[in-house]
């Protein structure tokens, strides 16, 4: 309606039809860009709100500590949907479970095991999602696979050392 009123006023002041048509197109384009800008803003806001809510739920579900006589497990969220679980057993052994996605049931996961408490990862296990058949992607044992997969073991050792320094006090 506003466009028609502006065009009517413009037409009444000018007699050149070509100028009137150009002005009408210009007014329509401005209106379209305003609508597009508003829609993109709403879309970006909805995405940001969704990410914020997802992150909040991830923190609420995964930031926790469990202490039992036999072990202590510390879990913390990473990113929007991932989390890490660090478990220290009373015999000195340790496990690190890394879930990059929302759940091990939906996405891949990793398990690092320090079986003798020396601060080095003896086993690396990579699993696919639970809904996949044959979900074991890789199982590495330091004793046999270190030479071929040195970088993977070194990265796992580094991650384990970070967690030991942070939580073993």
Image (spheres, rainbow, N blue to C red):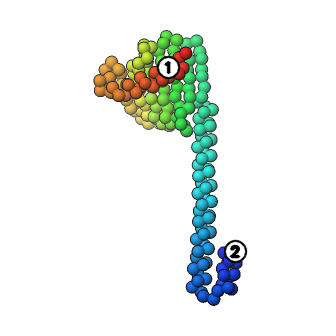
Residue pushed farthest top?
A: 91
Residue 120 in view in this figure: yes
Residue 164, numbered label: 1
Which residue shows up at 62% across the image and 37% down it? Answer: 56
Which comes sooner in the sequence, label 2 or label 1?
A: 2
What residue sits 61% from the left and 55% below the top? 41
State which mark lies toward you, 2 or 1: 1
Residue 10: numbered disc:
none
Residue under the image location 40 percent in, 27 percent down? 155
- Residue 43 x %, y %: 59, 54
Residue count near mark 1 (Cα–Cα under 10 Å), binned few <14, some 14–19, many ≥20: some
In the displayed orientation, state which residue is furthest to the front: 13
Quadrant where the N terminus sits is bottom right
Q: Nearer the viewer, residue 95 or 34?
A: 34
Choose between 155 and 140: the one closer to the eye: 155
The image quarter containing residue 108 is top left
Can residue 139 be seen from the camera position used here?
no
The residue shown at (44%, 20%) is: 113
Element class at badge 2: loop
Disc 1 is placed on an element classified as: helix
Q: x, y percentage for residue 135?
A: 42, 32
| Above-or-below relation of 5 to 115 | below
In the displayed structure, 23 sits above or below 84; it is below
Where is mark 2, residue-wise?
Answer: 1
Mark 2 vs mark 1, CA separation in Å: 68 Å
Where does the C terminus fall, quadrant-wise?
A: top right
The reply to whether discs 2 and 1 touch (Cβ–Cβ < 8 Å) is: no
Residue sitting at the far left: 147
Count of numbered labels shown in the rendering = 2
């Amino acid at each position: 309606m506003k466009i028609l009123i502006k065009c009517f006023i413009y037409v009444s002041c000018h007699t050149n039809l070509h100028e009137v048509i150009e002005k009408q197109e210009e007014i329509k384009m401005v209106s379209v860009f305003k609508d597009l800008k508003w829609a993109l803003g709403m879309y970006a806001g909805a995405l940001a709100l969704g990410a914020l809510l997802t992150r909040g739920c991830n923190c609420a579900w995964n930031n926790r500590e469990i202490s039992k006589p036999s072990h202590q497990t510390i879990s913390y969220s990473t990113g929007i949907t991932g989390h890490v679980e660090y478990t220290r057993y009373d015999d000195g052994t340790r496990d690190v479970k890394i879930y990059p996605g929302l759940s091990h049931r939906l996405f891949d996961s990793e398990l690092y095991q320090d079986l003798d408490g020396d601060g080095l990862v003896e086993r690396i296990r990579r699993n696919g999602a639970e809904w996949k058949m044959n979900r074991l992607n890789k199982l590495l044992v330091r004793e046999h696979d270190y030479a071929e997969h040195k970088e993977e073991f070194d990265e796992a050792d580094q991650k384990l050392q970070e967690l030991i320094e942070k939580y073993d006090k």
